[in-house]
Amino acid sequence: MLPYIARRLALVVPVLFVTSLVVFLFVRALPGGPAIALLGERATPEAIAAFERAQGLDRPLYAQYGSYLRNVLSGDLGVSTRSRQPVAEELLQRFPATVELTLAAILIAVLVGVPLGFVAAKRYQGPLDQASLVGSLIGISFPVFFLGLLLKYVFAIRLDWFPTTGRYDITSSLDTRTNFLVLDALLAGDGAALADVLLHLVLPAVALATIPLAIIARITRAATLDVLDEDYVRTARAKGLRGAIVDRRHVFANALLPVVTVVGLQTGLLLTGAVLTETVFSWNGVGSWIVEAISYRDYAVLQGGILFFVLVVVLVNLLVDISYAFLNPRIRFR
Amino acid sequence: MSSAAWTAWEGADPVRPPAGPLLSVRDLQVRFVTRDRTVHAVNGVSFDLDAGQTLGLVGESGSGKSVTSLALLGLLPRRTAQIPAGEVRFADEDLLHAPESRLRQVRGNDVAMVFQDPMTSLNPVLTVGRQLTETLRTHLAMDKQQARDAAADLLDRVGIPDPRRRLREYPHQFSGGMRQRVMIAMAIACRPRVLIADEPTTALDVTIQAQILELLRGLVETERMGLLLITHDLGVVAGVCERTAVMYAGRIVETGPTADLFARPRHPYTLGLLRSVPRLDAGSDLPLAPIPGSPRDLTDAPSACAFAPRCAYATDESRERLPVLTPVDGDRDHLVACWNPVSDAQRVSSA
Ligand SMILES: Nc1ncnc2c1ncn2[C@@H]1O[C@H](COP(=O)(O)OP(=O)(O)O)[C@@H](O)[C@H]1O
Ligand SMILES: [Mg+2]
């Protein structure tokens, strides 16, 4: 198991190296540049040249990339051209918001999607199966952005059950030490703050969870149907085990394997969704940070933010592979 | 075999002599009904099995052997399988109408099964030990330690070396033959009185086949189990079974003591089967000849001899009326369902 993890970890380095190069070139391929974005369309050529010289943007690309890479390796992600804050500092400030949101979403997607898919398979072609089929089709085809706006309009604005934007009530006295607000509220032992933070989390998390939930439900259903036909399930029944034990120990444990893989593949999709969801709900995470950075051509922020997303995807998939191996002895004992 | 757990296990089930046969099946019918079609898989099957006896159920693939065996324990898919008629009695208890809770007590405990493919019949994500102990713990109320000891003894009994270590391993770490031994160990764990083995050697290579059959034969002898051995391979039947029932299109077409049936097959289908397998034993002078044609489509319930379209002996009656099992030459032990059974003279001249 350990050599396996080490091998997988070693792969992270080249992946990050290649993506850093791609992202570096990509942000520079965007039309316009930080100078025009910041100084305006009518800025004089002299002013633009001066800005680019100050930022080092007049140097050849390879030289820029070389110093960028050197800085990144020493933990310096550059400075935002807009806020003039170090990117690493802003990232540390913002990433807990995104992690909290995506974790909540994946939790909803798994905790609802897996049981739903399993029960649908057990009641194959019954009313619940049909309903979940239609439901998940709708879930998959609904654009996240639109769903976010809809949820916000209905449940926050019309019904006023949930707050419309933000992560917590800023008039409260919550000490946002880690910026994982659920954790902060727990650490403070502040029940009211926890309730407030969770209320803020519900709508964006549900909006973000919809598509992964639908996909996870479909995959769980298909995997369960496959496993129900397996010979070892017949063996388990022929032993005289109770139906619930056959389901849990023999069907579910095997049906979970493909689901775990899909959860990993969903991370990329989830982060893309987070960009939109954060914008709709003014959620101060990495997603909305990137969206703002695009209009300012804020190269350092874009590079830092996207590289962070890549790192998350890579790490989550590593985690998924490890848990897959843990669940599947055929891989664990090779 | 001398450990404390084994002794406890040995005393678990006192053997009562049953009044009738141990397992008795009468006129069993099974069909699968789906939206677009009906399959008449089993169309009136009857047989008896006594303690210590081995009955071979043979027939080409698709003749309804597996469906018959699954029907005995209520293991057919509930959504599509129907059992419109028939009787299954185990130790004088009606199993066909027993509630699911009672069937669960019988399965794996009184009547156990071994399936064809040991590669797919074991759960890949559970250790072999877990799969063995769960049967013991379900039926014999053993605690963890007792069950582990008994499981190790079981592996030892079916000829798996180093049982304590192997209990911690997963199915993919065993070879095909060893996996089938594990399946057998699981099946005999609760000392069942009937063992149903559905093509237990079909997926294995020839030398392993012989070992597994030897193991089963030994178990029948020491445990006095009744063994229903399902196979499409007459060679397997010849070596192991006292009695043989030949199945075609969901019906038993001929049944009798194995030696008698092999020496004097009465049904043209039995004769065809015997001719289509290469036989290693001496004294076989019949040329190898596969049965022409393909098995009957099972969409309709049979109303005539199902084998007639493929049969050289078929008469008008064969094509019109359903033959039932009748004694051969007044021998109540050897029955054949045929309007024009093969006579001794015909058999010799056709060879
Ligand atoms: N679950 C099922 N649904 C529909 N038809 C089935 C099902 N199981 C078996 N059958 C059909 O029943 C017939 C007998 O099958 P089976 O008992 O498996 O044959 P055998 O074991 O003798 O090879 C075949 O025609 C098969 O296609
Ligand atoms: Mg079969």
Image: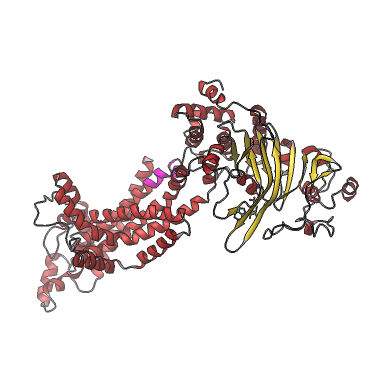
Q: In which quarter of the image is residue A210?
A: bottom left
Query: Which residue corresponds to the image point at 36% horizontal and 49% vertical from the top-left?
Result: A320
Q: Which of A12 and B261 is in front in this view?
A: B261
Note whether residue B245 is visible.
yes
Q: Residue furthest bottom?
A: A42
Residue B293 in the image: above or below residue B273: below
Q: Quadrant of the N terminus of chain B?
A: top right
Q: With respect to residue B341, does B309 lie above or below? A: below
Residue B177 seen anywhere in this rendered image of the structure: no
Residue at the location (58% across, 49% down)?
A: B76
Position of residue A94 in the picture relative to residue B236 (left or right): left
Q: Is residue B148 left or right of residue B222?
A: left
Q: Is residue A107 above or below residue B92?
A: below
Picture coordinates of residue A97, whole percent (x, y): 20, 56
The picture quadrant where one finds residue B20 is top right
Q: Give the range drawn in magenta.
A: A322-334
Quadrant in the picture for residue A206: bottom left
